Image (tube, grey):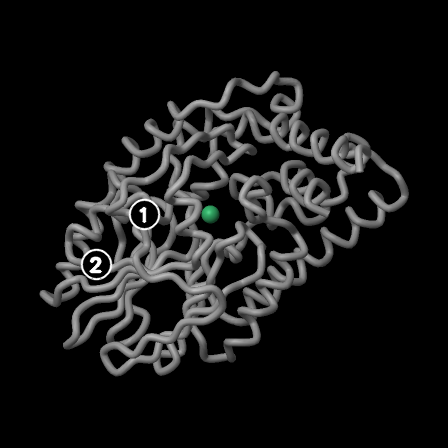
Amino acid sequence: MSSKLATKQTTRREVLQMGSGLAGAALLSGALPLAVRASTGGSRQAQQQVPAPISNDRVAQMRAQAASIPVRTQKLRENIYMLSGPGGNMIALTGPEGKVLVDSSFAGAAPKVIEALAAIDAKPLKLLINTHWHFDHTDGNAAMHEAGATIIAHENTLKRLSAPQEIAAFQMHFDAAPAAAWPRRTFSDKFTLYYNGEELDLGYILPAHTDGDIYVRYQNGNVLHAGDVWFNGTYPFIDPSSGGNINGMIAGSAQCLAHVDADSVIVPGHGPSGNKAALTKYHDMLVTVRDRVQKQKAAGKTLPEVVAAKSTADLDAEWGKGNVTGDFFTTLVYSTL
Ligand SMILES: [Zn+2]
Protein backbone atom coordinates (compact mmCIF):
# COMPACT_ATOMS: atom_id res chain seq x y z
CA MET A 1 0.00 0.00 0.00
CA SER A 2 2.81 2.40 0.86
CA SER A 3 4.57 1.73 -2.44
CA LYS A 4 1.33 2.41 -4.27
CA LEU A 5 1.02 5.71 -2.44
CA ALA A 6 4.60 6.63 -3.30
CA THR A 7 3.94 5.92 -6.96
CA LYS A 8 0.90 8.14 -6.93
CA GLN A 9 2.77 11.04 -5.36
CA THR A 10 5.60 10.74 -7.85
CA THR A 11 3.11 10.67 -10.67
CA ARG A 12 1.40 13.84 -9.50
CA ARG A 13 4.70 15.69 -9.14
CA GLU A 14 5.80 14.55 -12.59
CA VAL A 15 2.59 15.74 -14.17
CA LEU A 16 2.95 19.07 -12.35
CA GLN A 17 6.47 19.55 -13.58
CA MET A 18 5.56 18.68 -17.12
CA GLY A 19 2.52 20.89 -17.27
CA SER A 20 3.86 23.87 -15.41
CA GLY A 21 5.18 25.65 -18.48
CA LEU A 22 2.08 25.20 -20.55
CA ALA A 23 -0.08 27.85 -18.90
CA GLY A 24 -3.22 25.85 -19.35
CA ALA A 25 -2.84 26.15 -23.09
CA ALA A 26 -3.94 22.61 -23.80
CA LEU A 27 -7.12 23.01 -21.85
CA LEU A 28 -8.10 25.82 -24.15
CA SER A 29 -6.67 24.29 -27.27
CA GLY A 30 -6.84 26.69 -30.18
CA ALA A 31 -8.67 29.38 -28.24
CA LEU A 32 -5.57 30.78 -26.58
CA PRO A 33 -4.22 34.01 -28.07
CA LEU A 34 -0.89 33.63 -29.84
CA ALA A 35 0.91 36.00 -27.48
CA VAL A 36 0.20 33.67 -24.60
CA ARG A 37 1.13 30.60 -26.62
CA ALA A 38 4.45 32.16 -27.53
CA SER A 39 5.27 32.77 -23.89
CA THR A 40 4.63 29.19 -22.82
CA GLY A 41 7.76 27.06 -22.52
CA GLY A 42 8.47 23.82 -24.34
CA SER A 43 8.35 20.56 -22.45
CA ARG A 44 12.12 20.52 -21.82
CA GLN A 45 11.93 23.89 -20.13
CA ALA A 46 8.82 22.83 -18.25
CA GLN A 47 10.58 19.79 -16.85
CA GLN A 48 13.28 21.95 -15.35
CA GLN A 49 10.91 24.41 -13.73
CA VAL A 50 9.96 24.14 -10.10
CA PRO A 51 6.17 24.12 -10.01
CA ALA A 52 4.76 27.43 -8.83
CA PRO A 53 2.17 27.40 -6.04
CA ILE A 54 -1.35 26.75 -7.25
CA SER A 55 -3.06 30.06 -7.94
CA ASN A 56 -6.03 31.37 -9.83
CA ASP A 57 -4.27 34.29 -11.55
CA ARG A 58 -4.08 32.34 -14.76
CA VAL A 59 -7.75 31.52 -14.56
CA ALA A 60 -8.60 35.23 -14.23
CA GLN A 61 -6.33 36.04 -17.16
CA MET A 62 -8.02 33.46 -19.39
CA ARG A 63 -11.47 34.67 -18.42
CA ALA A 64 -10.50 38.22 -19.40
CA GLN A 65 -8.97 37.11 -22.71
CA ALA A 66 -12.04 35.09 -23.67
CA ALA A 67 -14.12 38.27 -23.90
CA SER A 68 -12.25 39.40 -27.02
CA ILE A 69 -12.43 36.10 -28.94
CA PRO A 70 -15.19 36.04 -31.60
CA VAL A 71 -17.88 33.34 -31.51
CA ARG A 72 -18.35 31.62 -34.89
CA THR A 73 -21.63 29.94 -35.84
CA GLN A 74 -21.65 26.94 -38.18
CA LYS A 75 -24.91 25.37 -39.35
CA LEU A 76 -24.70 21.57 -38.97
CA ARG A 77 -28.34 20.63 -39.66
CA GLU A 78 -31.61 22.48 -40.29
CA ASN A 79 -32.01 23.36 -36.57
CA ILE A 80 -28.59 22.41 -35.12
CA TYR A 81 -25.64 24.82 -34.98
CA MET A 82 -22.06 24.60 -33.71
CA LEU A 83 -20.74 27.66 -31.85
CA SER A 84 -16.98 27.91 -31.47
CA GLY A 85 -14.13 30.28 -30.68
CA PRO A 86 -13.57 30.91 -26.97
CA GLY A 87 -13.46 27.78 -24.77
CA GLY A 88 -14.94 24.43 -25.73
CA ASN A 89 -17.18 23.92 -28.76
CA MET A 90 -20.90 24.43 -28.18
CA ILE A 91 -23.99 23.10 -29.96
CA ALA A 92 -27.32 24.95 -30.13
CA LEU A 93 -30.55 23.15 -31.02
CA THR A 94 -33.44 25.49 -31.82
CA GLY A 95 -37.17 25.09 -32.47
CA PRO A 96 -40.66 26.04 -31.28
CA GLU A 97 -39.94 24.99 -27.68
CA GLY A 98 -36.84 27.19 -27.37
CA LYS A 99 -33.13 26.56 -27.49
CA VAL A 100 -31.00 23.82 -25.94
CA LEU A 101 -27.31 24.67 -25.63
CA VAL A 102 -24.46 22.25 -24.95
CA ASP A 103 -21.64 23.87 -22.90
CA SER A 104 -21.30 27.53 -22.00
CA SER A 105 -17.67 28.58 -22.68
CA PHE A 106 -16.10 31.23 -20.43
CA ALA A 107 -18.08 33.76 -18.41
CA GLY A 108 -16.27 36.54 -20.30
CA ALA A 109 -17.55 35.15 -23.60
CA ALA A 110 -21.18 34.94 -22.42
CA PRO A 111 -22.38 38.20 -24.05
CA LYS A 112 -20.98 37.01 -27.40
CA VAL A 113 -22.51 33.54 -26.98
CA ILE A 114 -25.91 35.07 -26.16
CA GLU A 115 -25.54 37.37 -29.19
CA ALA A 116 -24.71 34.36 -31.41
CA LEU A 117 -27.78 32.49 -30.10
CA ALA A 118 -29.99 35.51 -30.82
CA ALA A 119 -28.56 35.75 -34.34
CA ILE A 120 -29.83 32.20 -35.08
CA ASP A 121 -33.42 33.14 -34.22
CA ALA A 122 -35.48 34.78 -31.46
CA LYS A 123 -36.36 31.55 -29.61
CA PRO A 124 -35.45 31.80 -25.90
CA LEU A 125 -32.73 29.71 -24.27
CA LYS A 126 -34.38 27.00 -22.15
CA LEU A 127 -31.82 24.31 -21.37
CA LEU A 128 -28.06 24.04 -20.99
CA ILE A 129 -26.22 20.70 -20.94
CA ASN A 130 -22.62 20.49 -19.64
CA THR A 131 -20.31 17.84 -21.14
CA HIS A 132 -18.00 18.07 -18.04
CA TRP A 133 -17.01 20.55 -15.33
CA HIS A 134 -13.91 22.24 -16.88
CA PHE A 135 -14.22 26.00 -16.81
CA ASP A 136 -13.82 26.47 -20.56
CA HIS A 137 -17.13 24.52 -20.85
CA THR A 138 -19.06 25.71 -17.75
CA ASP A 139 -17.80 29.16 -16.77
CA GLY A 140 -20.70 30.76 -18.66
CA ASN A 141 -23.27 28.63 -16.77
CA ALA A 142 -24.48 31.42 -14.45
CA ALA A 143 -25.01 33.79 -17.37
CA MET A 144 -26.94 31.14 -19.33
CA HIS A 145 -29.00 30.35 -16.25
CA GLU A 146 -29.85 34.05 -15.94
CA ALA A 147 -30.79 34.03 -19.62
CA GLY A 148 -33.37 31.33 -18.80
CA ALA A 149 -31.59 27.99 -18.97
CA THR A 150 -32.06 25.06 -16.60
CA ILE A 151 -28.73 23.24 -16.39
CA ILE A 152 -28.35 19.46 -16.86
CA ALA A 153 -25.15 17.45 -16.33
CA HIS A 154 -23.70 14.25 -14.93
CA GLU A 155 -23.82 14.08 -11.12
CA ASN A 156 -20.00 14.28 -10.88
CA THR A 157 -20.07 17.59 -12.77
CA LEU A 158 -22.36 19.02 -10.07
CA LYS A 159 -20.07 17.61 -7.36
CA ARG A 160 -17.04 19.32 -8.89
CA LEU A 161 -18.75 22.64 -9.71
CA SER A 162 -20.15 22.93 -6.19
CA ALA A 163 -16.78 22.47 -4.43
CA PRO A 164 -13.28 23.94 -4.88
CA GLN A 165 -11.24 22.19 -7.60
CA GLU A 166 -7.71 22.06 -8.91
CA ILE A 167 -6.41 21.16 -12.32
CA ALA A 168 -3.04 20.02 -11.02
CA ALA A 169 -1.40 19.66 -14.42
CA PHE A 170 -1.83 23.40 -15.02
CA GLN A 171 -1.62 24.48 -11.37
CA MET A 172 -5.05 26.02 -11.59
CA HIS A 173 -7.30 26.52 -8.61
CA PHE A 174 -11.05 27.09 -8.82
CA ASP A 175 -13.37 28.21 -6.07
CA ALA A 176 -16.76 26.51 -5.98
CA ALA A 177 -18.98 27.95 -8.73
CA PRO A 178 -21.89 30.15 -7.61
CA ALA A 179 -25.14 28.25 -7.09
CA ALA A 180 -26.64 29.83 -10.23
CA ALA A 181 -24.02 27.90 -12.23
CA TRP A 182 -24.87 24.48 -10.77
CA PRO A 183 -26.69 21.81 -12.76
CA ARG A 184 -30.21 21.39 -11.28
CA ARG A 185 -30.93 18.13 -13.11
CA THR A 186 -28.31 15.41 -12.86
CA PHE A 187 -28.06 11.78 -13.88
CA SER A 188 -25.68 8.88 -13.32
CA ASP A 189 -25.86 6.80 -16.49
CA LYS A 190 -28.31 7.95 -19.16
CA PHE A 191 -30.80 10.77 -19.66
CA THR A 192 -33.18 11.26 -22.58
CA LEU A 193 -34.72 14.59 -23.53
CA TYR A 194 -37.45 15.15 -26.12
CA TYR A 195 -37.27 18.71 -27.38
CA ASN A 196 -38.25 20.45 -30.61
CA GLY A 197 -39.09 17.09 -32.20
CA GLU A 198 -35.54 15.94 -31.50
CA GLU A 199 -34.46 13.12 -29.19
CA LEU A 200 -31.33 13.98 -27.24
CA ASP A 201 -29.58 11.01 -25.68
CA LEU A 202 -27.14 11.93 -22.95
CA GLY A 203 -24.80 9.12 -21.95
CA TYR A 204 -22.17 8.83 -19.25
CA ILE A 205 -18.65 7.94 -20.31
CA LEU A 206 -16.67 6.18 -17.55
CA PRO A 207 -13.72 8.35 -16.32
CA ALA A 208 -11.86 9.49 -19.44
CA HIS A 209 -10.94 13.20 -19.71
CA THR A 210 -12.55 13.79 -16.28
CA ASP A 211 -14.93 11.68 -14.17
CA GLY A 212 -18.01 13.55 -15.39
CA ASP A 213 -17.78 13.26 -19.18
CA ILE A 214 -20.93 12.70 -21.21
CA TYR A 215 -21.75 12.55 -24.90
CA VAL A 216 -24.87 14.17 -26.33
CA ARG A 217 -26.45 12.36 -29.29
CA TYR A 218 -29.06 14.09 -31.49
CA GLN A 219 -30.96 11.07 -32.73
CA ASN A 220 -32.86 12.67 -35.64
CA GLY A 221 -30.18 15.15 -36.68
CA ASN A 222 -27.50 12.43 -36.50
CA VAL A 223 -25.12 14.74 -34.64
CA LEU A 224 -22.98 13.81 -31.63
CA HIS A 225 -21.16 16.11 -29.19
CA ALA A 226 -18.22 14.10 -27.82
CA GLY A 227 -17.04 16.68 -25.27
CA ASP A 228 -13.34 16.67 -24.45
CA VAL A 229 -13.08 12.93 -24.99
CA TRP A 230 -12.32 14.09 -28.54
CA PHE A 231 -9.79 16.75 -29.50
CA ASN A 232 -10.09 16.69 -33.29
CA GLY A 233 -6.68 16.48 -34.95
CA THR A 234 -4.45 16.89 -31.89
CA TYR A 235 -3.27 15.02 -28.81
CA PRO A 236 -5.90 15.54 -26.11
CA PHE A 237 -5.47 16.90 -22.61
CA ILE A 238 -6.38 14.37 -19.91
CA ASP A 239 -7.06 15.69 -16.40
CA PRO A 240 -5.71 13.18 -13.85
CA SER A 241 -6.75 15.37 -10.91
CA SER A 242 -10.39 15.01 -12.05
CA GLY A 243 -10.15 11.25 -12.49
CA GLY A 244 -9.12 11.28 -16.15
CA ASN A 245 -7.01 8.47 -17.63
CA ILE A 246 -5.85 7.19 -21.01
CA ASN A 247 -7.72 3.89 -20.94
CA GLY A 248 -10.92 5.81 -20.28
CA MET A 249 -10.18 8.08 -23.25
CA ILE A 250 -9.79 5.01 -25.46
CA ALA A 251 -12.98 3.40 -24.13
CA GLY A 252 -14.84 6.74 -24.30
CA SER A 253 -13.90 7.45 -27.90
CA ALA A 254 -14.93 3.86 -28.77
CA GLN A 255 -18.25 4.47 -27.01
CA CYS A 256 -18.80 7.61 -29.12
CA LEU A 257 -17.91 5.64 -32.27
CA ALA A 258 -20.61 3.11 -31.39
CA HIS A 259 -23.21 5.90 -31.60
CA VAL A 260 -22.28 7.29 -35.03
CA ASP A 261 -22.30 6.25 -38.67
CA ALA A 262 -20.72 7.51 -41.88
CA ASP A 263 -23.29 10.34 -42.15
CA SER A 264 -22.93 11.63 -38.57
CA VAL A 265 -21.52 15.06 -37.76
CA ILE A 266 -19.35 14.76 -34.63
CA VAL A 267 -18.45 17.84 -32.60
CA PRO A 268 -15.28 17.55 -30.52
CA GLY A 269 -14.61 19.54 -27.34
CA HIS A 270 -11.83 21.29 -29.26
CA GLY A 271 -10.98 21.49 -32.94
CA PRO A 272 -13.21 21.52 -36.03
CA SER A 273 -16.35 19.40 -36.39
CA GLY A 274 -15.58 16.03 -37.93
CA ASN A 275 -16.84 12.61 -38.91
CA LYS A 276 -16.53 8.95 -38.00
CA ALA A 277 -13.34 8.48 -40.02
CA ALA A 278 -11.58 11.33 -38.16
CA LEU A 279 -12.73 10.06 -34.75
CA THR A 280 -11.61 6.53 -35.66
CA LYS A 281 -8.16 7.79 -36.63
CA TYR A 282 -7.88 9.66 -33.32
CA HIS A 283 -9.01 6.59 -31.36
CA ASP A 284 -6.39 4.46 -33.12
CA MET A 285 -3.70 7.05 -32.31
CA LEU A 286 -4.64 6.88 -28.61
CA VAL A 287 -4.31 3.09 -28.71
CA THR A 288 -0.93 3.28 -30.45
CA VAL A 289 0.54 5.71 -27.90
CA ARG A 290 -0.96 3.82 -24.95
CA ASP A 291 0.49 0.50 -26.17
CA ARG A 292 3.95 1.98 -26.71
CA VAL A 293 4.05 3.69 -23.31
CA GLN A 294 2.53 0.70 -21.49
CA LYS A 295 5.15 -1.65 -22.91
CA GLN A 296 7.98 0.55 -21.60
CA LYS A 297 6.33 1.13 -18.24
CA ALA A 298 5.80 -2.62 -17.83
CA ALA A 299 9.50 -3.12 -18.58
CA GLY A 300 10.31 -0.88 -15.60
CA LYS A 301 11.21 2.32 -17.45
CA THR A 302 10.74 5.55 -15.50
CA LEU A 303 8.78 8.49 -16.87
CA PRO A 304 11.90 10.54 -17.77
CA GLU A 305 13.25 7.49 -19.62
CA VAL A 306 10.04 7.00 -21.55
CA VAL A 307 9.84 10.71 -22.43
CA ALA A 308 13.50 10.67 -23.51
CA ALA A 309 12.78 7.67 -25.74
CA LYS A 310 10.47 9.91 -27.84
CA SER A 311 7.84 7.22 -28.30
CA THR A 312 5.58 9.57 -30.25
CA ALA A 313 8.27 11.01 -32.59
CA ASP A 314 6.63 9.65 -35.75
CA LEU A 315 3.21 10.99 -34.68
CA ASP A 316 4.15 14.45 -33.41
CA ALA A 317 4.14 16.23 -36.79
CA GLU A 318 0.48 15.32 -37.21
CA TRP A 319 -0.89 15.23 -33.65
CA GLY A 320 1.47 17.50 -31.71
CA LYS A 321 0.62 20.67 -33.60
CA GLY A 322 -1.88 21.74 -30.93
CA ASN A 323 -0.90 22.75 -27.43
CA VAL A 324 -0.34 19.24 -26.09
CA THR A 325 3.14 18.21 -27.21
CA GLY A 326 4.20 14.61 -27.68
CA ASP A 327 6.22 14.78 -24.45
CA PHE A 328 3.32 16.17 -22.43
CA PHE A 329 0.92 13.60 -23.87
CA THR A 330 3.41 10.81 -23.12
CA THR A 331 3.52 12.09 -19.53
CA LEU A 332 -0.27 12.11 -19.26
CA VAL A 333 -0.47 8.58 -20.66
CA TYR A 334 2.33 7.19 -18.47
CA SER A 335 1.02 8.78 -15.30
CA THR A 336 -2.55 7.53 -15.79
CA LEU A 337 -1.70 3.93 -16.68
ZN1 LIG B 1 -11.97 19.69 -20.56
Q: Which mark is residue 93?
A: none
Query: Furthest-left residue in view?
Result: 122
* Disc 2 target residue: 149
* Disc 1 target residue: 105
Q: Is residue 194 left or right of residue 203?
A: left
Q: Amino acid at mark 1?
A: Ser
1 or 2: tag closer to the N-terminus = 1
Q: Residue at x 41, y 68 (%)?
A: 216
Is the shortest distance between ligand 1 and the CB of mark 1 under 8 Å?
no
Comparing 26 with 135, the one in front is 135
Q: Amino acid at mark 2?
A: Ala
Badge 1 element: loop
Percent x, y of residue 236: 56, 48
Q: Residue at x 27, y 46 (%)?
A: 140
Q: Are marks 1 and 2 in contact (CB under 8 Å)?
A: no
**The quadrant where residue 72 appears:** bottom left
Badge 2 element: loop
